[in-house]
Image (cartoon, grey):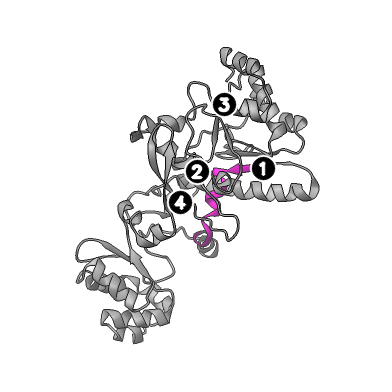
């Protein structure tokens, strides 16, 4: 979808009569279309193709010869059995950039294990550091390991295209959900490397910056504050009416605040319960302190900044009518990304692709349909 938003022509190959698994993920559905499927399949064309047949494989080979990139996310070994692996495809399309996304990679002790996002979030360490102390680990609220692998794949594909522009050669790209998830551990991993100690789950708090978390307000809403240095802490104390905290050796520096976290946070929690979320947000904004609300989704998509930045857009779908989409976060001065097409119906562009891209005639296309190849 990222590459499609950036202007690529993306052809999504799906199983005839069945399609992508996420077409059945629901409810909710909109006019029979899965809301899950609709969220990540814009700017794509749908071609149904039976890759278990020799004729279906030949169509794929023909496509590879016309296209720049082939992206697949089968389990390791499946593309070998189907004869659509990199070795086979690149022998027919030497310049192809072939990107494979798997749970664990094409090699290693876990290569054959099945993987879904929640499994990888746990195994990659994200769930181990997410949630409240002495409570069960928490899955991050979106499929972050899945989405992150797609983002890394998009970056890698663009880099491979740049390399091919210099060398004229395609290549194989190996993206693993586990690798991508582990790469996000960043400073949490650095703390482990430095101390040899596992991090405890801390809710919204930060292990080495205090105060840097959310606080409950009088109306049982939440406000986040990010006091990243001692100057900000002094201003924050002034706002809270506890200026003496800024000079107290227990709190005057960030290292001291980390050591004395419990005492400080308990006092701040008491103070935040004295005013509503909107009262605190107004005061924090006036003081130019980094802070914000913890929004529900309805609040996110009515927020004036989100709307101004066009992060909520409406598009027309062939079956579901007008649907909402998250906008494109990448802004360009000259080549503005656009949503050209809505998420496709199953096989919606099959005949168009076979005809206009591959040059198949009507008789050939009709035969492929009759034999359930497409």
The residue where tag 3 is placed is 350
6 up-or-down from 83: above or below:
below
Q: Earlier in the sequence, mark 1 or mark 4?
A: 1
Give me the residue at 29% from left, 70% from top. 281
Residue 154's label in the rendered image is: none
* Quarter of the image that includes the C terminus: top right
227 is within the stretch colored magenta: no
Please provide percent x and percent y for residue 337.
Answer: 55, 51
Magenta residues, start to end: 173-188
Q: State if disc 4 and disc 1 touch (CB < 8 Å).
A: no
Apparent side of residue 317 relative to residue 92 in the rendered image (left or right) = left
The 10 Å Cα crowd at callout 3, few under 14, some 14 to 19, many 20 or more, is many
Spatial CA span between label 4 and label 2:
19 Å
In the picture, measured across the screen, residue 200 lies left or right of residue 177, that is left
Q: Nearer the viewer, residue 161 or 148?
A: 161
User: In the image, which is nearer the foreground, mark 2 or mark 3?
Assistant: 3
Above or below residue 279? Residue 36 is: above
Name the mark on residue 173: 1
Instruction: Name the magenta segment's main secondary structure.
Output: helix
Q: What element carries label 3?
A: helix
Q: For mark 2, what is the residue?
A: 146
């Amino acid at each position: 979808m990222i590459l499609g938003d950036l202007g690529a022509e993306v052809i999504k190959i799906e199983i005839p009569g069945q399609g992508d698994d996420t077409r059945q993920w629901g409810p909710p559905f909109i006019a029979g279309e899965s809301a899950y499927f609709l969220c990540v399949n814009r700017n794509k064309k749908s071609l149904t193709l039976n890759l278990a047949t020799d004729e279906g494989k030949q169509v794929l080979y023909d496509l590879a010869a016309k296209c720049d990139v082939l992206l697949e996310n089968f389990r390791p070994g499946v593309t070998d059995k189907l004869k659509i692996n990199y070795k086979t495809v690149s022998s027919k399309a030497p310049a192809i950039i072939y990107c494979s996304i798997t749970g664990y990679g094409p090699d290693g002790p876990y290569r054959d294990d099945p993987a879904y996002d929640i499994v990888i979030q746990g195994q990659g360490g994200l769930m181990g550091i997410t949630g409240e102390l002495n409570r069960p680990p928490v899955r991050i609220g979106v499929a972050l390991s899945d989405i992150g692998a797609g983002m890394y794949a998009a970056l890698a594909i663009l880099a491979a295209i740049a390399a091919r522009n210099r060398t004229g050669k395609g290549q194989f790209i190996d993206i693993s959900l586990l690798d991508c998830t582990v790469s996000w551990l960043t400073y949490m991993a650095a703390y482990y490397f430095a101390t040899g100690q596992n991090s405890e789950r801390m809710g919204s708090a930060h292990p080495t910056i205090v105060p840097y978390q959310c606080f409950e307000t009088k109306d049982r809403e939440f406000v986040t504050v990010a006091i990243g240095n001692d100057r900000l802490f002094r201003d924050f104390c002034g706002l809270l009416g506890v200026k003496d905290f800024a000079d107290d050796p227990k709190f005057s520096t960030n290292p001291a605040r980390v050591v004395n976290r419990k005492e400080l946070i308990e006092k701040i929690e008491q103070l935040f319960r004295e005013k509503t979320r909107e009262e605190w947000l107004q005061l924090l904004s006036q003081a130019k302190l980094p802070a914000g609300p913890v929004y529900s989704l309805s609040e996110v998509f009515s927020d004036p900044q989100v709307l101004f930045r066009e992060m909520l857009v409406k598009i027309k779908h062939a079956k579901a009518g007008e649907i909402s989409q998250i906008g494109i976060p990448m802004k360009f001065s000259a080549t503005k990304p656009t949503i050209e097409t809505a998420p496709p119906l199953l096989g919606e562009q099959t005949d168009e692709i076979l005809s206009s891209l591959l040059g198949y005639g009507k008789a050939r296309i009709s035969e492929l349909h009759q034999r359930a190849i497409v």
